[in-house]
Image (tube, coloured by chain):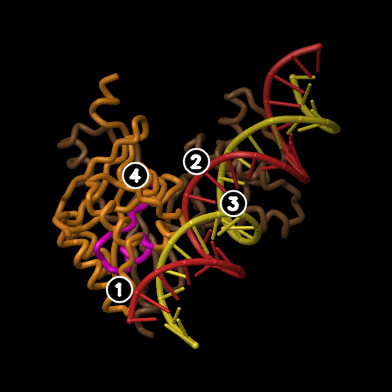
Chain colours: A brown, B orange, C yellow, D red
Amino acid sequence: MKTETLQFKSYIEEKGLLFTPERQSVAEEVFSSHDHLDAEKVLKSLRVRGSKVSRATVYRTLDLLVESGLVEKIDLGEDRAAYEHIAGHPHHDHLVCLRCGKVQEFEEPLIEQLQEWACEKASFKATGHSLNIYGYCENCTAK
Amino acid sequence: MKTETLQFKSYIEEKGLLFTPERQSVAEEVFSSHDHLDAEKVLKSLRVRGSKVSRATVYRTLDLLVESGLVEKIDLGEDRAAYEHIAGHPHHDHLVCLRCGKVQEFEEPLIEQLQEWACEKASFKATGHSLNIYGYCENCTAK
DNA sequence: GTTACTGCAAAGATTTTGCACCTAT
DNA sequence: ATAGGTGCAAAATCTTTGCAGTAAC
């Protein structure tokens, strides 16, 4: 079992909950993908792999994964929520292509620093943030 | 009529569309508020003022306002879209309080600069962006 | 007399929830 | 036994759309 899956198992069990096969399937699906996933994609991949987890359980497990801190819920300006696992994935922001939908990631430590500064000035206690830049990716600009 | 309402009227008429009383009402409502509005709030305010514009027309007019460039659609991580008018309102980002829901604005020109830089590095042609910081405002931290 | 606009109610889409049944301790 | 989990279908929420009637040019 992957390290992350094990961490999720620990989280679940420490909370006195059960690490069911359904929860394991959803977790493995999320941890095995390096793309941005949404509930529907997770469900479809599970179905393709022959795993029969219901939509409700996918949603419920995604919430647990977020609670555990192993997965982040991100909002890319679309109508459905996306998720990405965090392990080996330092915090980053997103470049969202409005034409092809591709999402690139970028990192800019100085931006993070300036955000902290802005929060201090406003006496605001930050717990997280989301920075999306919308526009056109290299491919789509060329056309 | 407010300058912004007149600009919207021009935009509408240049497109060969009609500047109806309904469109005017919605525009005035949006331009007169300095808060973040959503479709439902606009509808309610209009009702309170005795204006009977349908929900569908509110949505349709908000789209037009965004198209006109006078209003920005912003996504504060909630389930409904928020809108704010742009005039006299330089670009800014948002501090969203997870407890009381208050949204404060802040500006940090250097962040904008760094974003441009990040886009250049990725050969990405940006058209807009959204930066939300989530956490707890001064009031809510105190408690 | 077209073309465009509105309102209504229905449809869409995503996510949540109530409930009956099942499973682990 | 008891607490928790799952699946299903219904509900909830926000937004869009089809259509019939109305108004503007």
- According to the picture, the residue beneath numbered tag 1 turns out to be B123
Residue A54, given in percent of the width and then of the height, sits at 71, 46
Please name the amino acid that badge 3 sits on: Ala
* Residue at (16% x, 50% y) in the render: B108
- According to the picture, the residue beneath numbered tag 4 turns out to be B45
Q: Earlier in the sequence, mark 1 or mark 4?
A: 4
Please name the amino acid that badge 2 sits on: Leu
Q: Is residue B137 a member of the stretch shown in magenta?
A: no
Q: Nearer the viewer, residue B141 or C24?
A: B141
* Whether residue A113 is visible: no
Which secondary structure, mark 4? helix
Please name the amino acid that badge 1 sits on: Ser
Which secondary structure, mark 3? helix
Would you say A87 lies left or right of B95 here?
right
- According to the picture, the residue beneath numbered tag 2 turns out to be A70
Q: Nearer the viewer, residue C8 or C25?
A: C8
- According to the picture, the residue beneath numbered tag 3 turns out to be A39
Please name the amino acid that badge 4 sits on: Ser
Give the distance between the C-alpha atoms of the residues marked 3 and 1, in whole angstroms.
Answer: 31 Å
Q: Nearer the viewer, residue B92 or A92?
A: B92
Residue B28, given in percent of the width and then of the height, sits at 26, 55
Give the distance between the C-alpha atoms of the residues marked 3 and 4, in whole angstroms.
Answer: 35 Å
